[in-house]
Amino acid sequence: MKMKSKVKKNDVEFGNWMRQFYNKKAKNISEKGYEYARWFSTPKKRIQYKFTIKSLIYHLRDIKFKKCLEVGCGPGTWTKLLLYKYPNASFTSLDISKEMISQFKQNINEKKKVKTIVNNFLDYNFKNEKFDFIFCSRAIEYIPNKSAVIEKFNNLLENGGKGIIISSPPHPKILAMKKFIGKKANIQHIKRISVKNIGFLLKKNGFTKIKFYPILFSDFFLVPRKFFFRTLYRRRWGILSKMFASGYIVKFEKPNEKY
Ligand SMILES: C[S@@+](CC[C@H](N)C(=O)[O-])C[C@H]1O[C@@H](n2cnc3c(N)ncnc32)[C@H](O)[C@@H]1O
């Protein structure tokens, strides 16, 4: 009997699949590149881009750093903002996809300040290098072993260092509906982690000042997403975010050691 092909749960195999997925997607999605296709090709996407920029500017207002690690940097869409806001900082930007890093290099001018790495985050050996800020936007949902990711963030952050993760919560109802109508869920979208579970992992690893906020929204009947965004993006994640937000941002800090 022929076995159905199935992506193995194994992290390395999933990473290899993900590498191929993003190499292909980034190359073929548009001749103008992944960033254009994802953020600028339709009015809705341009609105989501504006939401993210506005949220990031707001959430970065109390963060200072000199050395940033960006995990799953893609084509460098948010790296440009970080470079602009932190002109004296240095950056290490890592992505599993060499095509993404190639587009990143085309997008980023300040080459001297940015070191790029093509590797699976969990496999990469940073030796003893430490950072005072970790930024990870829309990438943790593509790495199955969240517990290992958060533990590695803890090992890589200096005491007093801060982090920001942007991600999307799982949508069990949409997945159930897809199953009901006989459609397969996209493999790349089944590894999402909820606000509750990521909060648990951050706490378990000793992080403090863990704060969640909504970041992206969808239209809801006659209520446009702009309304939800304006009303909620500066407020902590709560029942309304749970109902209407399609993405969250979490800020956290590694405490200074007590003597
Ligand atoms: C949706 S894109 C996000 C890109 C960018 N951070 C942004 O917010 O626009 C997800 C990125 O995560 C990268 N990625 C997925 N799994 C990874 C892993 N295990 N290690 C490093 N990067 C990974 C992908 O190659 C891709 O560039």
Image: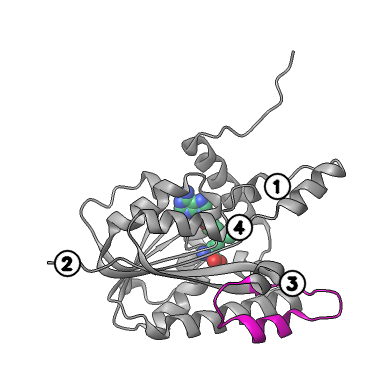
The kind of residue on which mark 4 rests is Ala
Q: Left or right of 2: which side holds 232?
A: left
Q: Earlier in the sequence, mark 3 or mark 4?
A: 4
Q: Residue at x 59, y 81 (%)?
A: 233
Q: Earlier in the sequence, mark 1 or mark 3?
A: 1
Residue at image mark 1: 186
Q: Is residue 6 visible?
A: yes
Asked which quadrant contains residue 134, the reply is bottom left
Q: Earlier in the sequence, mark 4 or mark 1?
A: 4
User: Is the CB atom of the residue marked by disc 4 within 8 angstroms of ligand 1's nearest atom?
Assistant: yes
Give the Cα separation between the discs numbered 1 and 2: 45 Å
* Residue span colored magenta: 216-238
Name of the residue lying farthest toward the left: 259
Residue 69 at x, y = what percent?
35, 64
Residue at image mark 3: 218
- Circles 3 and 2: CB distance less than 8 Å? no
Give the Cα separation between the discs numbered 2 and 4: 45 Å
Name of the residue lying farthest toward the front: 239
Q: Left or right of 48: which side holds 72?
A: left
Residue 105 at x, y = what percent?
45, 66
The kind of residue on which mark 2 rests is Lys
Q: Earlier in the sequence, mark 1 or mark 2?
A: 1
Residue 210 at x, y = what percent?
42, 68
User: Is the CB atom of the residue marked by disc 2 within 8 angstroms of ligand 1's nearest atom?
Assistant: no
Q: Residue at x 65, y 70 (%)?
A: 239
Residue 51 at x, y = what percent?
62, 80
Residue 258's disc number = 2
Viewer-proximal residue, 184 or 197? 197
